[in-house]
Amino acid sequence: MHFTRLRLNGFKSFVDPTELVIRNGLTGVVGPNGCGKSNLLEALRWVMGENRPTAMRGSGMEDVVFAGTNSRGARAFAEVALSVDNSDRLAPAGFNDSDTLDITRRITRDAGSAYKVNGKDVRARDVQMLFADASTGAHSPALVRQGQISELINAKPKARRRILEEAAGISGLYQRRHEAELRLNATEANLERVGDTVDQLA
Ligand code: ATP
């Protein structure tokens, strides 16, 4: 599986529909300061299911929608589409019936995000798992944002550990453990209540 095309529409500074062809081998993005190079990397993360606005340098996810300039009005939605070559048929089951996968994410102001794969509605989790199974995704350590290397060098040990854990892909496990602990606590509380009721009936 490899990325072949990225299309943006209304995403951050890419107000007009823009298409980038990603050929095999190394791709370089060059341009003056502020022309949108980082926005491109963020679009890639975003379409793969990034759900932290801070990773998009925003305070809310709707901040990715073109906000308008003196000469152009704000847009109501942003859309990013990523085409993936699946001719080796390595996509996970359920997505493996075509040579190309078109993954689309659209966010509409006040209506949140919607995802599609080859035109069919899917959940965010389906898209995240699709890329996770292909050993990539929004949190892939292969996507290195600007400043991340110096952050790593200058970070305090605890923060550095968090960065390394994210790169190792285990921060999701902490989240799952936390959720499991909450469920366990709730179950223990229920058990205690059942015990009290049994005691009263005895
Ligand atoms: P540098 O080389 O300085 O790091 P860059 O090429 O990576 O710059 P980006 O940081 O990707 O540039 O793009 C910044 C530009 O994107 C700024 O001009 C900013 O105003 C614009 N921008 C970011 N979010 C939005 C938005 N929601 N609507 C409109 N423009 C936006």
Image (cartoon, rainbow, N blue to C red):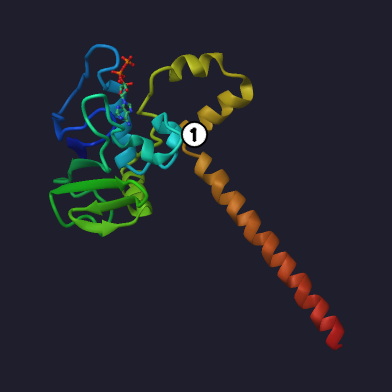
Q: Residue furthest front?
A: 70
The C terminus: image quadrant: bottom right
Q: What residue lies at 24% left-to-right and 53% top-to-bottom?
A: 116
Q: Considering only vertical position in the picture, is 111 above or below 80?
A: below
Residue 164 screen position, x and y as percent:
51, 28
Residue 161 screen position, x and y as percent:
58, 27
Q: Characterize the local packing of mark 1: few (<14), some (14-19) or many (20 or more) Cα atoms within 10 angstroms.
A: some
Q: Residue furthest bottom?
A: 202
Q: Tell me: 36 left or right of 156.
A: left
Q: What residue lies at 53% left-to-right and 33% top-to-bottom?
A: 165
Ligand 1 location (quadrant): top left
Question: Which structural element holds mark 1?
Answer: helix
Nearer to me, 40 or 100: 40
- Asked whether mark 1 lies closer than 8 Å to ligand 1, one says no
Q: Considering only vertical position in the picture, is 193 above or below 22?
A: below
Q: Quadrant of residue 77?
A: top left
Q: What residue lies at 86% left-to-right and 81% top-to-bottom?
A: 199
Q: Tell me: 157 left or right of 191.
A: left
Nearer to me, 92 or 111: 111
Look at label 1 and name its amino acid: Glu
Residue 154 screen position, x and y as percent:
55, 14
The N terminus: image quadrant: top left
Q: Residue furthest top?
A: 32
Q: Considering only vertical position in the picture, is 2 above or below 116?
A: above
Q: What residue lies at 71% left-to-right and 70% top-to-bottom?
A: 190
Q: Quadrant of residue 16?
A: top left
Q: Which residue is mark 1?
A: 166
